[in-house]
Amino acid sequence: MTAIDSTTERNSPALRSPVRWNRPLLWLTVACAGLALVSAVGVFADGRILTGVPIWLKPFKFGVSFAVYAWTLAWMLAILPRRSRPAEWAGVIIVGVTVLELAIIVIQVIRGTTSHYNVATPFDAALWSAMGTSIMVLFFAQVVIGVAALRQRIANRPAAYAIRLGLAISLLGMGLAFLMTSQETAGGTIGAHSVGVADGGPSMPITGWSTTGGDLRISHFVGLHALQALPLLAYALGRWTGRPERVRARLLLVAGGAYTVLVLLLTWQALRGQPLLKPDALTMAAFAGLVAVTAAAVTAAVRRRVS
C-alpha cells in the first residue's frame, strides 16, 4: 500500500470517529444494557423455570442482543458521509418498537408465562400480536437504513461492503424468524423454536438451543449478527493484514457470500430436525463444501492482480 493510499484510508469517513450519533439509539443501548444487568440478577435470585431454563434468561439474552444491535446501528448511521433523515427517523422507530418488545417480554416474565407464540388467553394473544407487528415494523425500518447505506458513497470500500452486506444478511436472519411461527404446536401456543422436538427440552447452556432436535434460533442468531461480524472483519483486515484496499474489498465480498450460505445451511439443518452439534453425513458434506469453496475464493481474491 502506498503512502497516498494509507493517508486516503485514514481520512475515509468509514474510519474516522463518528460525529453524528443517533441519541435515541444510544439511550436504547444503555437501557438494554441495564435490562441485561437486572435480568442477570434475576436469573440467580428468581428460582422459577420456564421452558426448561431460568425465567429471566430470555430478557437477559434480549437485553444483550438489543444493546449490541442498537449501538451497531447508531455507529453505522454516524459514519455515513451525509446525514439521512429517513434513516435517522428509522432509528427512532426501531427504538420505539424495541421498547415495546422488551416491555412485553418483561411483563410476561413477571406474570410467569411465555411471551413468544403464547395465545393461551386473549391477553396473551394480544401481547403476542403486538410483538409480531413490532418486529415487522423493525424489519422495514432497517430496510430504510439499508437503502440509505446503499445510496451513499462510502469512500472505504471494505467498510462499505461490510456495512451493506451486514445489513442485508441481518435482514435475512430477521426474516427467518417467521419460520418459527409455522411450526406445529399444541396447548396454547402458535409456533416454536424447535423442530422435531418440543420447546423446553435438553438444551445448550446460555443459548438454550436444543440438543435433541433442530433449532431455528441458530440461523436467526447467526444471520442477525452479520451486522457486527462483517464490520469487525473489515476492521481486522485493515488493521492487521496490510493488504491493499481492493484485495480487502474482494475478501469482504467472499465473506459476505460465505456468511449468507452459512445462514441458509444452518436453517436447512434445523428444518431437518438436526441438533447443531449432531449433523448427519449430508450436512457435514454441505458444510465441508462451503469451507472448500470459501477457501478457494479467498485464495483467488488474494492472488488476483487486476483491481
Image (cartoon, rainbow, N blue to C red):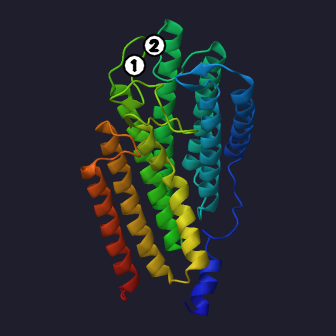
Q: Residue at x 60, y 21 (%)?
A: 49
Which sits in the foreground, 194 or 114?
A: 194
Q: Is residue 291 left or right of residue 14?
A: left
Q: Is residue 6 above or below residue 267?
A: below
Please state the horizontal and vertical placement of residue 284, each as a whole percent of the image: 30, 54
SS for callout 1: loop
Determine which of the numbered discs, if any, sits on residue 119 in the image: 2
Q: Residue at x 47, y 27 (%)?
A: 133
Which sits in the foreground, 115 or 135?
A: 115
SS for callout 2: loop
Mark nearer the N terminus (2 vs 1): 2
Residue 75 location, quadrant? bottom right
Which amino acid, mark 1? Ile
Which sits in the foreground, 236 or 148?
A: 236
Are the residues flagged by discs 2 and 1 in contact, CB closer than 8 Å? Answer: yes
Q: Is residue 253 left or right of residue 10?
A: left
